[in-house]
Image: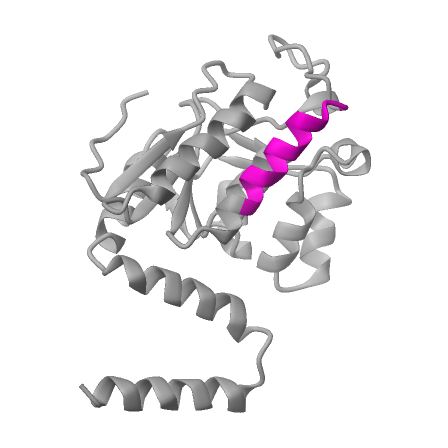
Amino acid sequence: MNTPDPGARVSILNLQLGTANSVMTPAMAHAGIEALSTALRDPDIRVIVLTGSDEQFCLGVGEQTRGVAGAAPAPADTDVAFIDALHDWLLALHDSDKPVIAAVEGEARGAGLALALACDLIVASRNAQFSLPVAAQLSGQSAGALWFAAQRLAAPSLLSELLLLDTALAGERAHQLGLVCRLADPGLALQDAVQLAEGMARHAPTSFAVLKQQILDVAARPLHEALSDERNRWLQSNAY
């Protein structure tokens, strides 16, 4: 992969999947949360980009990869340490006080879709594919992908389209539905994601933590409370 130089304020976390048929492994889950934790602790890093290989973002775990030519053997999905590490990784991505951008080439399937949706923003190539196989959802191997998708999609019918039809959403369709914020030409998702991250990194690091909390809070609050909170911040900012 031709990895762009992101500068000191942007960290690229590469899944290092390495093959065109790339599945989630216990080693990847453990390494992923360790790398993310390191980036979150670094005061110089303001924005994080999560990416996969040139061919695939992540094909998920277990049964959904059987029958795929060249796929690695499915891991032992009953491995409690694997499951817990994957779930901890997703929670850390979702709860990160630093913005995380997913750069998606190829497929983001099942748990791989969950990884992408756990990020704050997704930059995807036009030929990217987003899917939540029925088998992965029924077996519990989708790692919260359905929950994450429900937060992003405006109507239940769109969620049904993703799951019940058991077909992948192309990058352009995912962009239309609001799952993807920026479309890139094939092979340029990472480059475009880094460019987006560099622009964001100009803001003070404490600003992102505040903004992310506001994003989480706003949907659950009535308008009068949101206006009251803005009034207080406005007055406080003018007091200096």
Q: Magenta region, mostly helix, strand or loop?
A: helix
Establish if 3 lies above or below 72.
below
The span shown in magenta is 78-91
Establish if 195 lies above or below 207.
above
**Nearest the eye: 210 or 72:** 210
Residue drawn at point x = 71 percent, y = 24 percent: 64
Could you say which quadrant of the image residue 185 lies in? Answer: top left
Residue 174 shown left or right of residue 159 in the figure: left
Place of residue 222 in the rendered image (x, y in percent of width and height, measured from the top left): 58, 85
Give the colour scheme of this rendering.
one colour
- Tell me the quarter of the image containing the N terminus: top left
Place of residue 99 in the rendered image (x, y in percent of width and height, measured from the top left): 38, 52
Residue drawn at point x = 26 percent, y = 47 percent: 43
- Tell me the quarter of the image containing the C terminus: bottom left
Residue 187 shown left or right of residue 28 in the figure: left
Could you say which quadrant of the image residue 52 lies in? Answer: top left
> Of all residues shown, which one is farthest toward the right?
138
Say whether residue 82 is magenta: yes
**Nearest the eye: 228 or 6:** 228
Residue drawn at point x = 41 percent, y = 55 percent: 97
Q: Is residue 177 visible?
A: yes
Place of residue 59 in the rendered image (x, y in percent of width and height, measured from the top left): 59, 26
**Nearest the eye: 39 or 172:** 39
Q: Is residue 25 visible?
A: no
Q: How many marks?
A: 0
Residue drawn at point x = 72 percent, y = 58 percent: 157
**Nearest the eye: 42 or 53:** 42
